[in-house]
Amino acid sequence: MRSLARLDGPPSTASWAVLAAALVWWIVGLGFGPALRATEERSADLAWRLQASDVRERRIILIDIDEASISQVGPWPWPRQQLAQLSDRLAAEGAALQVYDIIFSANTSQDATLLASFKKNHAVIAQVFSTDHREPVTTGQPSGALDWSACPPGAPLAQGYIAPAPTFADLPAGHITPTIEADGAVRRVPALICHRGAVYPALFIAAIAQALSPKALTLNAGGGPLAPHSRLVGPSFDQDGLALDAHAQVRIPWTLRPEAFISLSATDVLAGRVPLRLLDNAWVVIGSSALGLNDRVASPFSGNTAGLLVHAQLLRGALDGTLPAQPRYGFIIETLVTSLCVVLLGYFGRLSRKPVYLMAVGAVVLAGLLWTAKAWLLTRSGLWFGWVQPAVFLLAFAACHSLIEYARDRIERDRLFNHLSSYLPRPVAAVLAKQDPSDAVDATRRHITVLFAEIRNFSAYCEARPPEESTAVLHAFFAMVTRQVEQHGGLIEFFQGDAVLAVWGSGGAGPAPEKALGAAIAILKESRTLLPPMGEDDIAPMELGIGLETGQAMVGSFGLARRRTHLALGHPVTAAARLQEMTAELAHPILVGEGMAASLGNHRLVSQGMFLLEGLKNPSHIYAYPLRECVE
């Protein structure tokens, strides 16, 4: 956690993101566990489809009891004598091993003929077990049990079976019990199944043992970080044995495309229409693709694949050592990889804190890399690692981290904006916050009303009183003026020393002279109680002077990009400042310029005559608001 915190921003950002992502990951796994597992399996299907080879397989040949065979020989089941002829023809063509994806569960008068052919032709037959506790079926007699004293932990327990007839009990047999996923696909097969204390191997295991060595098989626990849960070891297999998961299952290695297997119609074999020497020393898998026999499964290549292809793929994978192994400590390895990806995301977030959605893009890229690594390891090295759960965690981490960063940036942005708007009018701050700095003049001509207010004798007060007391008085004065101006619809343009400039109309609304005058009266009344009276130091009492004027002005930002200011420039600003200066001379705290007086009309203003205001060329008619009405 600390390393993550050091990588990116505030110490708590990455840590909180990890905790939040863990919570989201747990909730998603709890609510969508089956969907995540289905996604994991289907992504593996995609990897098989993309990487499967189309090189011809000549060691394992498929003998298909297809629609043409059913049409010519007759409906299934065929007479046992006919099957004996098929077995003999295969042997005559040179087949070294015959693996039957067929269950001979019924007794017939021709069993002796078929049994004799099977024994001399090295045949391995099938049986199927049922793990359904509700309707246990017991047909025939299971055979081919391993010479083991106990059932291995985790192996499926069968309640029923459909096995060969007792006549075939001496033949090597293997089960063809599939593990059917929720989507109907067959991706795993139990290598071992237990029934009444006996352990029965799968058909492909029984076939390999029959062809290579009939010696006993042993089950060893996996060792090493990449080792599977257990290995089925025997002279028939290579030194690594067959990789089994915790439930004694093997994954089907769909390493070869279905069309890469050579498939012969059973009727062609019976008729002797087999290419010369095609079956020499070959292993043949006999089954059916006929739709009426219902021996169809869903595979990565098709939703309607012949069942005999499953056994062919398993045989090929066992011979080549490509049966996928799920490492016993795979979860730990996945966790370490996920942690590394989180660190990479945190570092990426540090490099690109804005915009925050880039971290989500990084998480998607890493998720894609995880799937690519999973596909490569599965199809090239036979290692099964999950990528969906780590990807979910990474996406959750990126989303949580981005949300936290967004919230943090939003808080910082709001804080900066609040600071900016405390120094500038809020509408101006809102506009500037959305713009890049510029050296250009950004000003607009507007019709505005200006209020200029200043405390007289404040400098003498500051000289005589402690600075803390003067600061408190000025702070209270600025706060009061700001409140009154905003209540009357105006904006504070700036504070300068003990003076305030407020504007109406700078944001595009009308100049509102009535509201400006109302604000001036309210400010003057409240200042009478706010400003300290004359004290012991014989200091002249502080009084407030206010000047008001309406007219055309330029309002906007000026200066270089690195140091700008926002101002209102023009006649009403200058006139208001000069009117404020004349309040002491004319003994009226509120003076109004002729532009504003014209806008106010009959508003009980008292004419003070014509005056030439300092800095202006033309005389101006000045008006005063009656002092008695200000006091009332």
Image (cartoon, rainbow, N blue to C red):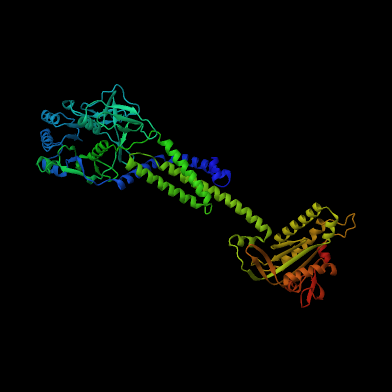
- Compared with residue 208, is residue 597 higher up or lower down, i.e. above or below? below
**Is 434 in front, or is 262?**
262
Give the residue at the far top of this rendering: 149
Residue 218 sits in quarter = top left
Residue at 45% over, 39% down? 336
Whether residue 16 can be seen here: no
Query: Image height check: is 62 above or below 476?
Result: above
Give the percent coordinates (x, y) of residue 446.
66, 71
- Give the camera-side residue of 613 and 14: 14
Residue 196 vs 6, above or below: the answer is above
Identify the residue at the far front of this view.
Answer: 239
The relative height of residue 387 versus residue 466 in the rendered view (above or below) is: above
Residue 94 position within the rendered picture, expressed as x and y whole percent measured from the top left: 13, 37
> Toward the viewer: 43 or 226?
226
Percent position of residue 418, x then y: 65, 55
Q: Residue at x 32, y 33 (%)?
A: 243
Q: Residue furthest bottom?
A: 618
